[in-house]
Amino acid sequence: MSQKPLRVCYFGTYRAEYNRNKSMITALRSQGVEVIECHETLWHGIEDRVQTASGGWRSPAFWWRVVRAYLNLLRCYRQCGEYDVLMVGYPGQFDVFLARILSLLRHKPLVWDVFMSIYLVALERELDSRSRFTINLLRRIERIALRLPDLLIQDTAEYVTWLHETHGISKERFRLVPTGADDSIFQPPHTVPKKSDFTILYYGTFIPNHGVRYIIEAARILSEHSEIHFELIGQGPEQRLARQLTREYKLKNVTFTDWLGKFELVARIASADICLGAFGTTPQSLMTVQNKIYEGLAMAKPVLTGDGPAICATFEHKKHIYLVPREDGAAIANGVLTLQANPDLQKRLSDEGYRLFKERYNLKALGSLAAAHLQEVTNGR
């Protein structure tokens, strides 16, 4: 007799458009899992969360917003019907408290895709300098929240170790589902237009763990190579610094582009010669493999990124990916020159990186892992 497909209630005020949530939902559905999205918007972008963590949470208007959001979430939940697993999406540090009550009332297991520590994110954004009380409160809330679910999901073993050491959570309570990429969107291009320049592409949120200043330093070192051009796409806290350094160095080989639509971005990746990852040394950067790295591999592009524990545990240097020391613009520049001068190495990275992605990090592979973890916790009830 075939096993009945799982029915999952994907619950919370999670970021509905964030890659992790979209990929997780799509990946589960690819395995025949029925996913009912029970979602209500609470946050209105990164700056909204930063302002709230900086002390805006004390405002009565914020708390009224919270009350309305969770009342609407409960109304949505009442319409979800029966399910096998209640799963909280990222970020869910506050949602798991309500989710725990609801799952107990239904006698169903609770799973939380932690993905990132909001306490660590707040630290890396130096919000402790604005409100030490808020930072300490975030740590306590997160510490309690991690103890509530029956199962926790994380993307790397290195992040699990950090959560264990910071919050005292047993590693046995975690299961891994890598970030991966949506291969229905990010695919190798059929044709790449011929061009005279050698394009190095960064895209992202210009946060400290990306180390964008070192990309600009590499562009400065390579400024006399007229054929090498850097394109930086996106917006974020360190974009102003990157633009300022570009002006100070009088660089003509750097172009800034604001956020693009998904398919416009895919077209830019397709025309790039090298895709860049992250070069900062924040804990978050060292413990994770950024979306852009998997997306570059999914499009069979050579990826150049900073080394680190999570990266080295996932990929092999000069086979799947090209690694350089972090916080080192000269190392990035040397890596670019090495790849430019070695088409065979570019092809190896393209072929082997793509092969590994298709084997382990596409949506089907991620969905198989995630579904197995959910089935495990369901069988354990």
Image (spheres, grey):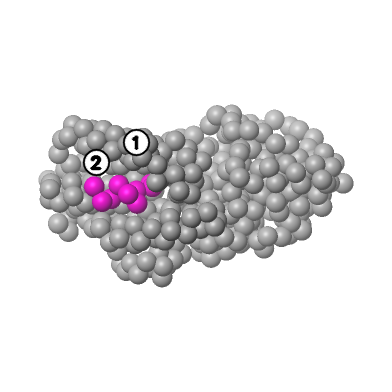
Q: Could you tell me residue 124's position as x and y percent?
A: 54, 56
Which quadrant of the structure image shows residue 316? Answer: bottom right
Rendered location of residue 235, percent (x, y): 61, 39
Place residue 159 in its image quadrant: bottom left
Of residues 250 and 314, the one nearer the viewer is 250
Residue 201 at what x, y percent from top left?
67, 42
**Which residue is painted at 24% across and 35% down in the image?**
71
| Residue that appears at 53% across and 50% down | 290
Q: Residues within 10 Å of mark 1 (few under 14, many from 20)?
A: some
- How far apart marks 2 and 1 lie (CA) works out to 23 Å
Task: Work out whether residue 104 can be spotted.
Answer: yes
Residue that badge 1 annotates: 65
Q: Residue at x 56, y 38 (%)?
A: 188
Q: Secondary structure at mark 2?
A: strand
Looking at the image, which is closer to me, 224 or 208?
208
Residue type at mark 2?
Cys
Of 150 and 136, nearer the camera is: 136
Give the total of numbered labels.
2
Q: Which residue is mark 2?
A: 9
Range drawn in magenta: 90-98
User: Taking 54 as reference, is 168 above or below it?
Assistant: below
Left or right: where 209 falls relative to 367: right
